[in-house]
Amino acid sequence: MAVGQQSLFGSGLKRWIPWLLLAPGLFFYFLIGVGPSMATAIYSLTDATGIRGLPINWVGFDNYDEFLFQGARSRDNLDALQRTLIFMVLVTSIQFGLGLVMALLVNQKLRGRMIFRTLFFIPVILGVAVQGLMWKLVLRPGGGPMDSIFGWFGLESQFLNGENAFYWVLVVQIWANAGFTMVIFLAGLQTIPADLYEAAAVDGARGWKLFKNVTWPQLTPAVNTNFLLNIVGSLQAWQLFLVLTGYKNGTQVLGYVVYAEAFGGTGTGSFRQGYAAAASIVLFLLVLILGMAANFVVSRRERKYMG
Amino acid sequence: MTAITDTTDVVVRDDAGARRRRITRMVSSYGIMLLFAAIYVGPLLILIFVSMKTLPEFFADPTGLPESFQFANFADAWELANFPRFLLNSLIYTVVGTTLFVIMSVFVAFPIARGYVKGAGALLTLYVVALFLPPALIPQFQLILNLGMFNTRQGYILLFLVNPIALIIMVNYIKSIPRELDESAAVDGCGYVRFVWSILIPLIRPAIATVTVIHAINIWNELILANVYLTNEDLFPITKGLIVFEGVYGSDWPKLAAAVLMLMLPMLVLFLFLQRYIISGLTSGAVKG
């Protein structure tokens, strides 16, 4: 191996072939992936609009100042920020719990378990347009299926048109993604060696005790992955709001504010992309801080259980 | 002797208890699973029922079974929603975008997985980090606008030539292929391109299947990028077409339900055939710690 790994497939000019073939993929990754992603920080310091040919000027931190501190708009923004956090906490905890229960159920040696697994996972592959329209039908006020169910209990709701619209979107969000949490737990459950259970059963452990002493610690990698993915994913999720409720004050989360401000979705028809970029960076910092906090918790858990 | 008898006794009693517990557990498991299944299949069933109702029938009873099985709504929606065109657009974006991406990503993933290029580790980190960076949305828009590719097929497809998760899946899979293979092929005088094309690709077929399906589903389901980059109705993919259709025929749920079903059908079929690949790909690396 004295020739070195780089020259395994030839020497001289031939040494550059791997680079040459890697270049297109890497080029596009920089051009439309990681490059623009990082450039968001730069745009957040300008007054860029979405209109071609209009000059772009530096405005320093004005966008941040306006977004967080100026006028009624900033109070709306802070509300959206708070709503994003509520969305994150509820989606993460409920989806985590449901995903775990579903995984434990379909991991048992029961007939038909493959059918249940498939059913619970299907919404994940449908995409927001189908997920959203499906639930718009289910949640149709004045005689929709959910309305009928509410009727049995003498309840009434305007669902997506009413004041609890936010929570209905939250329900759809969890319905759509719990299957993903489930398959990660399931993959984790299947790596647990059966003899651990046998040994614990010989010691007389069963039910809750078996779960607490064997399943839960053994499931650490899947628990951690789901915890992190759910936190980051729910902070960034907003697309279902677009299909289910549209842009309305009092329901939007931060991700939707970014999109609406940048692409004329606020109803005012303005494309404030510098401002939206600042909002995007605020959201990114939120993801970063909470993601790092979650990562801290997770690695402590890992040390505790995995040594 | 008594001790032995006692033990057997305990074991027998325990067996009966164990069986009872097992049965209780089985029954309650099925109960809960069926409840979940109802929540998961319910919306889909309602969609199917509604798609077979006439409009007056729907207004009279939005929830129940249809009176007869009729498919007029599907034909109507197909015509009214401009479905053939949108479907063709979605197909073009999905096939071209996925093919280009998968071919390019093999040639990116292989040298990174093997360390055949300098800085392979740093490159991989760059792909992992991307998962946490802010969305590329705004600068990307400025770029496409200034390239004059706004509202073009090429511009829209360009957006789908990147998928860090898919690339990481590919790298991880290639790492499981023994390196000795490269070495013996190289000794035999096999060139780099020929090696990747005719030896590596057949070996990593499961990873290619996973990445292809995941990426194709992403493109097929994309709504936000279509909203942002396409304003010319002739270029709309089917997701965007469906939302436009909803805007016009929003209260005609039977037709809308038929349209939604037609949109999801191709992905559903693809998924049912390839779910093994999709799920193994999405969970790979998730549980290894």
Image: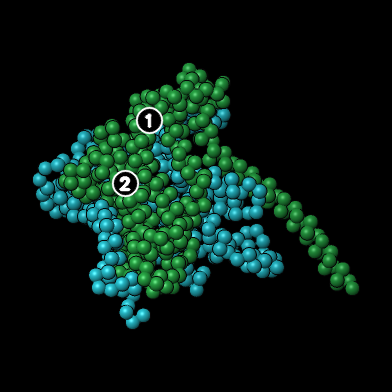
Chain colours: A cyan, B green
In the rendered image, residues at marks 1 and 2 fall on the same chain: no
Mark 1 residue type? Phe
**Secondary structure beneath disc 2?**
helix
Residue A195, position as x, y percentages in the image: 64, 67
Residue B118, position as x, y percentages in the image: 28, 71
Q: Mark 1 points at which residue?
A: B83
Count residues near mark 2 (Cα–Cα under 10 Å), then give few for <14, some for 14-19, many for 20+.
many
Judge left or right: residue A219 versus residue B112: right
The chain identifier of the residue carrying mark 1 reads: B
Q: Which residue is drawn at 60% across and 54% down?
A: A107
Count residues near mark 1 (Cα–Cα under 10 Å), then give few for <14, some for 14-19, many for 20+.
many
Q: Nearer the viewer, residue A13 or A96?
A: A13
Residue B160, position as x, y percentages in the image: 31, 48
Mark 2 residue type? Gly
The chain identifier of the residue carrying mark 2 reads: A
Q: Which residue is drawn at 49% across and 45% down?
A: B271
Q: Name the residue under label 2.
A: A255
Q: Quadrant of residue B222?
A: top left
Judge left or right: residue B195 versus residue A192: left
Residue B277, position as x, y percentages in the image: 49, 53
Distance from disc 1 to disc 2, alpha carbons, whole Å, reads 30 Å
Q: Nearer the viewer, residue B187 or B139?
A: B187
Residue A96 visible to the viewer? no
Residue B16 visible to the viewer? yes
Judge left or right: residue A87 versus residue A14: right
Q: Nearer the viewer, residue A17 or A255?
A: A17
Examine the rendered structure and indicate whether residue B11 appears above or below residue B279: below
Examine the rendered structure and indicate whether residue A163 appears above or below residue B161: above
Q: Which residue is drawn at 34% across and 67% down?
A: B191
Judge left or right: residue B204 versus residue A239: right
